[in-house]
Image (tube, helix red, strand yellow):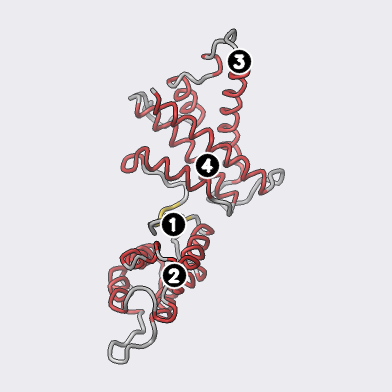
Amino acid sequence: MKHPLTDDIAAALSRFFHAGTGPSHSQLTAAFTGAGYLGDDPYSPATQTPNKETRVLSVCAAAIRRPDRAKKLVENILLQLRIKDCFSSSEHESDVLRLRNALRREGYSLSETGHLSALGDIDLATGGRDALEEQLDRIRRSTDDPALLLGSAKDLLEAVAKFVLEEEHMLPPGNPSFNQLWYLARDRLKVLPQQVPDAAPGGQQARKILQSSWTIAEQVNELRNLQGTGHGRTLPTAVSADLALLVVREACSVAQFMLSQVRTR
């Protein structure tokens, strides 16, 4: 995963400080110091120049050239913006949208409260079900970069299957494949097509729908392997951006269905 700092992201961050708004000079100094970029800050306390917007642009430019702690710098600036309540202020509504879009193009998500996370990065150990629900909602709302979203949807589906099996204390050892995880999870939740009585009213239709849900999950995995999220984010030639977004939204519905079965057990 590349660092979350580009010229577009730097420009978006700097807009929070336009015309003197946003966190104070001292708060910016704290953000730059914590990330190790204070030496790149052109600010003079004696003259109180340059302005905050220029300071952010200058330090971000240095971090783009030396990106080993660029993510830390962005996180530090976001912290100061949260302290200033910039993400809940109508004054910065357009700034938040601009920053969110710039980050998304680089594979990162900005939450409603101003916290940074990588798209598709789901930590079940620390986030558990909340992490899954947050990622599901994030993907469902997203519209940019369908190729990246396909990869994120695949990661979400795999994490959902692992979550189900961990909840049931049935996660197999080793490195099971995507298909194996999903078969075991569906079997445990009794949502395999063959587990629906065929003679029951609507049984045949229910079987077909459950089979279709698996087909969606399976094809998301295969599409992701074809387009390679981490290798250029290109879509297969037969898949349009609109079709990719349809697949992503359907994958979210399948993930939500599986989580609902865990909830009702």
- CA gap between label 4 and label 1 equals 17 Å
Q: Regarding mark 2 in the picture, which secondary structure is present there?
A: helix
The type of residue carrying mark 1 is: Leu
- CA gap between label 3 and label 2 equals 53 Å
The type of residue carrying mark 2 is: Glu
The mark found on residue 91 in the picture is 2
- Classify mark 3: residues with Cα within 10 Å, few (<14), some (14-19) or many (20+): few
Q: Regarding mark 3 in the picture, which secondary structure is present there?
A: loop
Is label 3 in contact with label 1 (beta carbons under 8 Å)? Answer: no
The type of residue carrying mark 3 is: Gly
Query: In the image, 104: left or right of 209?
Result: left
Mark nearer the viewer, 3 or 2: 2
Residue at 39% in and 32% down: 163
Mark nearer the viewer, 3 or 1: 3
The mark found on residue 202 in the picture is 3
Report which quarter residue 216 is drawn in. Answer: top right
The mark found on residue 153 in the picture is 4
- Classify mark 1: residues with Cα within 10 Å, few (<14), some (14-19) or many (20+): many
Give the camera-side residue of 43 and 225: 43
Give the x, y percent position of residue 105.
54, 59
Whether 212 is drawn above or below 3: the answer is above
Q: Earlier in the sequence, mark 3 or mark 2?
A: 2
- Classify mark 4: residues with Cα within 10 Å, few (<14), some (14-19) or many (20+): many
- CA gap between label 1 and label 2 equals 18 Å
Mark nearer the viewer, 2 or 4: 2
Name of the residue lying farthest toward the bottom: 47
Report which quarter residue 71 is drawn in. Answer: bottom left
The mark found on residue 110 in the picture is 1
